[in-house]
Image (spheres, rainbow, N blue to C red):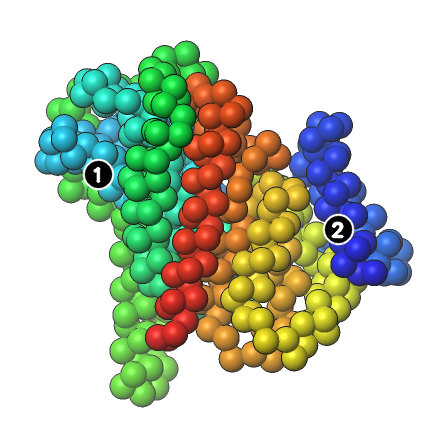
Amino acid sequence: MPLLITALGILLLLIMIMKFKINTFITLVVVSFLLGLALGMPVNEIMGSIEAGLGSTLASTGLIFGFGAILGKLIADAGGAQRIAMTLIAKFGEKRVQWAVILTAFILGIALFFEVGLVLLIPIIYQIAKQTNISFLWLGLPMATALSVTHAFLPPHPGPTVIADQYGANIGMVLLYGFIIAIPTILIAGPLFTKYARKMVPAAFEKAGEGSIAKLGDAKQYKLEDTPSFAISAFTALFPVILMGLSTIFTLIKDTVGMDDNLFFDIIATLGTPSMVMLLSVLLSIYTMGIARKIPMTDLMESAESSVKAIGMLLLILGVSGSLKEVLMDGGVGDYVAEVFEGSTISPLLLAWLIAAIIRLAQGSATVSALTTAGLVLPMVADSDVNLALMVLATGAGSIIASHVNDTGFWIVKESFGLSMKETFATWTVLETIISVSGLAFVLLLSLFV
């Protein structure tokens, strides 16, 4: 019954969002409350559970989400992203321009949210396609692949960061394993799949994309000499990963050597927390992308404020998706799932991927499916010796499978590249599924060695 009630709740969520077009934030609160009632929770405790879930989720991710949006906006407004793209193209040459695009998207994708990355890079990719006379989609699909992979697997992105917090996994190890999994996944789902997609839907690769680009808004173009240098731009975009990586290395050395905790390692650990990493990255970007270029502080703060305003609703949705997870846990669904699979020979990694994939298919949001999965499998993980960092990546992989009409990413890609519904299913939906399955395969492979 708990699983049936959960399935009906997810179905109701889907109907309210898709058929009745009700705001996702409102829908999540309503469905969370109704699920609490259906699961037999005391009526006077349900709202408390919803508030607790929202509070705990925002407490761990709100700063990361806000600072990440500011960082991406400052890099974009200063022309840093344009400098990275153009420099890589010049270095790689036109024949290998697709690899330049993949590397560009991967570098920027580490610091940017998926949607921000698309809006930022698509106008640049469009200009590259025109200048090199290469298919817009031929460059665009691998770019979107790199952004999607970083979004699914690499902290400080909200998805893997939130899941790591829920599982109690070491964020640095998630980042390290995420890199190992991300690179081959990008190669398979990016350039390799694009070759087959071009044969399956050739018409999609013949579209120039002029009309769709206009819908994204005007992209400010700079003369290359007016943008920050490549070294400064790349360093600013990669700074979050550099800080987190250094913190992880110091921690591993301490644990390996068996050194005791002291003030130095406490400071290193603090500097490596995602919220502190993003704060320091934003402060760095204010200098490198603004002060060093003599941009008035008022202009920089306007960019910062506009970026945070743009993610206001996303923050609420992110927070209340934690409420749904909290209600499922308080309602006993997680315990029930643990009982169902108690003694099961199925790998916890495969189970986490499977549950996340099913929920993703039902309601569309990768973040909601990941958080809900965490709530369902947490009780089972507590009694298991499974690698928690790999659990994070398996859950992330399942949560991005088969993007379709109930996923905003589906519509963003469709409109960005000017594709028909059929073409979007044949390219983007299949691509996301390849990322998900490849991610699971590499997680299972990695689990044999760690």
Q: Is residue 159 above or below residue 404?
A: below
> Percent x, y for residue 127?
26, 19
Identified by mark 2, the residue type is Ala
Residue underneath mark 1:
99
Identified by mark 1, the residue type is Trp
Residue 140 location, quadrant: top left
Left or right relative to 388: residue 371: right
Secondary structure category for the residue under label 1: helix
Report the residue at 36% width, 82% height from top.
261
What residue occupies the far front of the structure in this picture?
A: 199
**Looking at this view, is 185 or 42 the one in front?**
185
Report the residue at 37% width, 68% height from top.
446
Image quarter hosting the N terminus:
bottom right
> Percent x, y for residue 173?
38, 67
Kindly report the distance in space between the C-alpha atoms of the residues bearing marks 1 and 2: 42 Å
Residue 200 location, quadrant: top left
Secondary structure category for the residue under label 2: helix
**Looking at this view, is 335 or 108 the one in front?**
335
Residue underneath mark 2:
7
Q: Is residue 234 above or below residue 131?
A: below
**Looking at this view, is 77 or 415 the one in front?**
415
